[in-house]
Amino acid sequence: MRDHSELELLLKGYGLTTARILYHYPDHPHLLQTYIWQDYDIAPKFPILGAFITFWREKLEGPLHSVCFTHQKLISASEWRKVDGEILLH
C-alpha cells in the first residue's frame, strides 16, 4: 500500500481509520496503556487494521484489552467533477 500516494488511496475508496487501543502494561498487568493508531483502510472489512491487530497479538507482549475505532472517507464521488477547461484572469 505504501507505493501509492495518499490521493490515489483516497480515490480507490480508502478512508482514514483511527483506532484507540487499550492494552495491559506487560510489567504491571493491572494497568492499562493507550496506543493511538492511524492508517488508510477500506470499510467495512478493515484489512489493514485487522493485520495490525494480528501483528500485535503475535509479536507484542502487552495483551489487548479493547480496540475502538472510527473511519472517515475523506473524498466521495460527489466531491469530484470533470473540468474541460480553465480560464485564467490576470
Image (cartoon, rainbow, N blue to C red):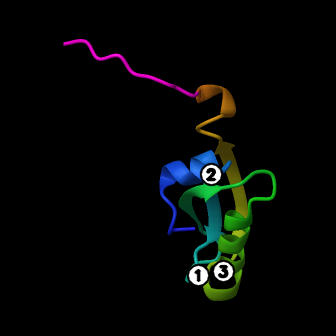
Q: Nearer the viewer, residue 78 or 67?
A: 78
Image location (x, y in percent) of residue 68: 70, 53
The Cα–Cα distance between marks 1 and 2, rounded to whole angstroms, is 26 Å
Mark 2 vs 3: CB contact within 8 A: no
- State the residue position of label 2: 17
- State the residue position of label 1: 26
Image location (x, y in percent) of residue 74: 59, 38
Please tell me which residue is depicted at 60% across the width and 68% down the height of the picture: 31
Mark 3: amino acid: Phe
Q: Nearer the viewer, residue 52 or 45?
A: 45
Rendered view: 16 above or below 48: above
Q: Is residue 87 left or right of residue 3?
A: left
Answer with mark 1 or mark 2, whichever residue precedes in sequence: 2
Answer with mark 1 or mark 3, whichever residue precedes in sequence: 1
Answer with mark 2 or mark 3, whichever residue precedes in sequence: 2
Q: Nearer the viewer, residue 67 or 70?
A: 70
Please tell me which residue is depicted at 63% across the width and 87% down the height of the picture: 59
Q: Is residue 41 left or right of residue 35?
A: right
Image location (x, y in percent) of residue 84: 50, 25
Q: Is residue 89 left or right of residue 31?
A: left
- State the residue position of label 3: 55
Which quadrant does the C terminus fall into?
top left
Rendered view: 88 above or below 84: above
Q: Is residue 51 left or right of residue 3?
A: right
